[in-house]
Image (tube, rainbow, N blue to C red):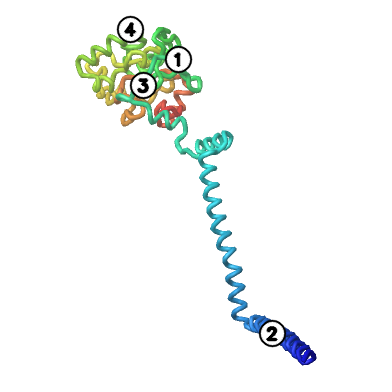
Amino acid sequence: MKKSQASNKTKYILISVITVIALAVAIGFIVFFSNNSTQNNPVEQQNQKHIESNEPEESTEQEESIENSEADKEEGLESTPDEEEKTNEEETQNETPPAAEEKDDKVTKENGYIVGQMLPTEPTYVDGVLIANKKYPLPQNYNPGENVEARAAFEEMAQAARKEGIELTAFSTFRSFEYQQSLYKRYVDRDGKDNADRYSARPGYSEHQTGLAFDIGEVGKEDLWLTSEFGESTAGKWLVNNAHNYGFILRYPKGKEEITGYMYESWHFRYLGVPLATDVKNSGVTLEEYLGIQ
């Protein structure tokens, strides 16, 4: 009886071991075939690789884009002083209007005069030539009197004209600041400022204050003095054609009011000396144009 029980127990153990071994072998086969199935499916492998490859790339690109955007904002908001200074310098260099052009844009003019302009303390010379016009005034205390050299040149010219039967006279030459002030006021009271500014200089701006301007007429024909008709007379034509030989130029010719600032004055001549007067005459332009100060 005991022997039979021992035999049954041994059989039971053997069956259990065989069963375990069989299960292990079965599991091994299942795992083996499962791996082979995955490796042998190229489409699935490629798709898997594509998914694994693309997901990190998209994430990286988005993160870099966000980081760059944030960096740009921080750079714009928190730039260093050196960077701000460099940026300001670059913006200044890129601005198109030069300083001179900005200054001109801000200048307000009235009949050719710069509004608010103060009289200088020294007279203005351009290429050695004394200038007095609506842009370049003279000091109030500039008081040289009639220029001696200019008077001598006029007398020589008058003598030459006399040989041609023309008797010239200089009826107005040097004017002081104070005299021009009273004269201009009289013209303004009579004709209004806009009209007066076309033919009479404001005090400090008159070429007569230089002592080099001569208003010339013909003796016995005073009715033509200070008129455009004088330019059509024999005396007026002679002056235009010969004045430069004695150092004078017609200062305010026809059609140049926008440049000289004054209407045509057939009687107003300016002494420059023979060489310069001849050059200006031959150039066919005004003194402003010749000197490049128009």
Question: What residue does disc 1 label?
Answer: 123
Q: Which mark is residue 230?
A: none
Tell me the SS state at disc 1: loop
Work out which residue is located at the far front of the displayed protein and give it.
1
Q: Position of residue 186 (x, y in %)?
A: 23, 12
* Foreground label between 1 and 2: 2
The answer to which of 107 and 47 lies nearer the viewer is 47
Tell me the SS state at disc 2: helix
Question: What residue does disc 4 label?
Answer: 178
Alpha carbons under labels 2 and 4: distance apart: 132 Å
Q: Is residue 82 visible?
A: yes
Residue 179 as seen in the image, left or right of residue 35: left
The answer to which of 151 and 201 lies nearer the viewer is 201
Q: How many marks?
A: 4
Q: Position of residue 182 (x, y in %)?
A: 28, 9
**Pointer 1 with pointer 2, Cβ within 8 A:** no
Alpha carbons under labels 1 and 2: distance apart: 121 Å
Residue 238 as seen in the image, left or right of residue 30: left
Tell me the SS state at disc 3: loop
Alpha carbons under labels 1 and 4: distance apart: 17 Å
The answer to which of 228 and 291 lies nearer the viewer is 291
Q: Which mark is residue 23?
A: 2
Tell me which label, 3 or 4, sits earlier in the chain: 3
Q: Residues within 10 Å of mark 2 (few under 14, many from 20)?
A: few
Q: Quadrant of the N terminus?
A: bottom right
* Foreground label between 2 and 4: 2
The answer to which of 35 and 128 lies nearer the viewer is 35
Residue at figure coordinates x 51%, y 42% from the top left: 76
Tell me the SS state at disc 4: helix
